[in-house]
Image: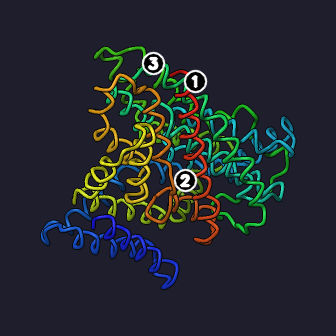
Amino acid sequence: MVLLKILFCIILLVLLVSWLKINPFITFLIVSLTGGLLLGLPLDKVTKSVEKGLGDTFGGIAITICVGAMIGKLVAVSGAAQKIAGVLVNGFGIKYIQWALMLVGFIIGIPLFYETGFVLMIPLIFSVVYRYKLHAVYIGLPMLAALSVTHGFLPPHPSPTGLVNAFHADMGKTLMYGLMLAIPAIIVAGPLLSRTLKKIDSNPLATFRAEEMPEDKLPGTFNSFFTALLPVLLLMSTTVYLNFDHSHSTIHNIIAFIGDAPIVMLISLMVATYTMGIKQGMDMKHVGHHCAHAVKDVSLILLIVAGSGAFKGVLSDSGAAKEIADILKSFNLQPLVLGWLIAAIIRISLGSATVAGLTTAGIMSGLVLHDPSINPNLMVLAIGAGSLTCSHLNDGGFWLFKEYFNLSIKDTLRSWTVMETSVSIIGITGVLILNAVIG
C-alpha cells in the first residue's frame, strides 16, 4: 500500500509539472503535502515535516550554489573560462575535449560533494560549448557522469563513508574496488552514451555566457586555473590532512573549519574577487553587480532543489522508506543484489542518493555483519550503485541539470536519467563480477 501511495505522488508530480506546467517548486509543495496526508502523518505535523525537509535541503545547498554561481560568473566575465577552454582544447584537441573534461570531473569529484562540483564545473563546460559551438549535453554529460560516480561509489563522500563504517569495511579496499568499477561506468555513461544525444537542443543558462575577449585581455593561464580550481584544491588538501590527523588539536580544528564547504567557497570567492575582478580592472561595484546577477539567475534552481527536499522530508518522517525496505528484505535474493535493489527503490521514491545509501546501510548492516560470506567492501559499492538509479523529478540533481542546461523534461529524462541508471546497472554488474572473482 505504501508503494502505491508513493507511486501516486510521483505520477502526480510528473503530471503537474509536465502536463499542467505548474512551477516545479509549487508542485513539490503540493505533492509533499498530499504525500504527507496519504502516508498518515498527523495533520499538525505535515506542514512541519515539509518545512523541515525544505529547510534542511536549502541550508545544505544555499551557500554552495549561490557562492559557486558568483565564482562562476566572475570566472566567465573575466575571460578565465575562455582561457581555460583554450588551454584544454590546445592540449587535447576538440576531438578529445570530452575526455579532458571527464578526467577533470573525476579528479575533482573525489573530494567534492556532487552539488559543489556541479556548480564549479558548469562555467568550464559552457565556456567550451560557447566558444567552439559544440552541443552542451554531448560535452557536459561525461564530466557530470564522473562527478556522479565518485559521489555514489567513493569515499570520502557521505554515503560510501557511512556504509564503510556501518559494515566495518576496509576504506582502502573499498576505494580500490570503487575505482575499478568507476572507470568503465564513467566511460559508458559518459562519452559513449553522449554520442547518442548530440541532437538534443540545449541553450545553457545565460549567466555563464561571456563575450569573446581578445587574447591579450585574458587572465594568465596559472591565474585562470588557480582561481577556478581553488575550491577543489582547498577541499582536497584539507581532506588529505584530516585523514592523517585524527587528533583534536587546535590545528586540526582550524583545518576542519577551513575545509568545510561553505568556508571554502567564501574564501574562494574573496580570492576570485581580487584575481578575476580587481586585478582585471573591475571596481567593487561591477564585481557586486556580477555577483548579484549570478544569484538572481540561480534563485529558481535553488527553490526547486529545496522543494525536492520537502518531498523527501515527508517520506522520511512518515517511515515510508523503512516500510519499503522491510518489504524488499523479505525477498529471497542474493545479498548484494538485495542491497542494490533496496537502495534503488528508496532512491526512486525519495530522490536522494545519500539518503538511499545511508537508509539501506541501517537495514542491511545486521545481515552483513553476521554473514561472513558477504564481502562488506562490495556491499558498500552495491548499495552505492543502487543509490544512483533512475534520478527523476523528485531529485534535486535532476533539476540542477535540467535548469542549468535549459532542457525539457523529456530531454532531461533521456539524457540525465538514462546516464544515472546506466551508471547504476554497470556498477552492480561490476560488483557481481568482482564477487565471483575474489569470492
Q: Tell me whether the residue at label 2 lies in contact with that at label 1, contact meaning CB atoms closer than 8 angstroms.
A: no
Residue picked out by circle 3: 241
Left or right of 235 in this view: 306: left
| Residue at x-position 14% and y-position 72% | 43
Report crowding for label 1: few under 14, some 14 to 19, many 20 or more residues within 10 A (C-alpha): few
| Residue at x-position 19% and y-position 64% | 48
Q: Between residue 267 and residue 407, name the one nearer to us.
A: 407
Report crowding for label 3: few under 14, some 14 to 19, many 20 or more residues within 10 A (C-alpha): some
Instruction: Where is residue 161? Give x, y as percent.
Output: 40, 31
Q: Between residue 406 and residue 348, name the one nearer to us.
A: 348
**Looking at numbered disc 1 in the image, what kind of residue is underneath it?**
Val
Q: Earlier in the sequence, mark 1 or mark 3?
A: 3
**Tally of numbered discs:** 3
Q: Which image quarter: residue 41?
A: bottom left
The alpha-carbon separation of the residues under discs 2 and 1 comes to 45 Å
Q: What is the image's colouring? A: rainbow
Q: Earlier in the sequence, mark 3 or mark 2?
A: 2
Residue picked out by circle 2: 69
Q: Which image quarter: residue 333?
A: top left
Residue picked out by circle 1: 437
Element carrying mark 3 = helix
Q: Between residue 215 and residue 108, name the one nearer to us.
A: 108
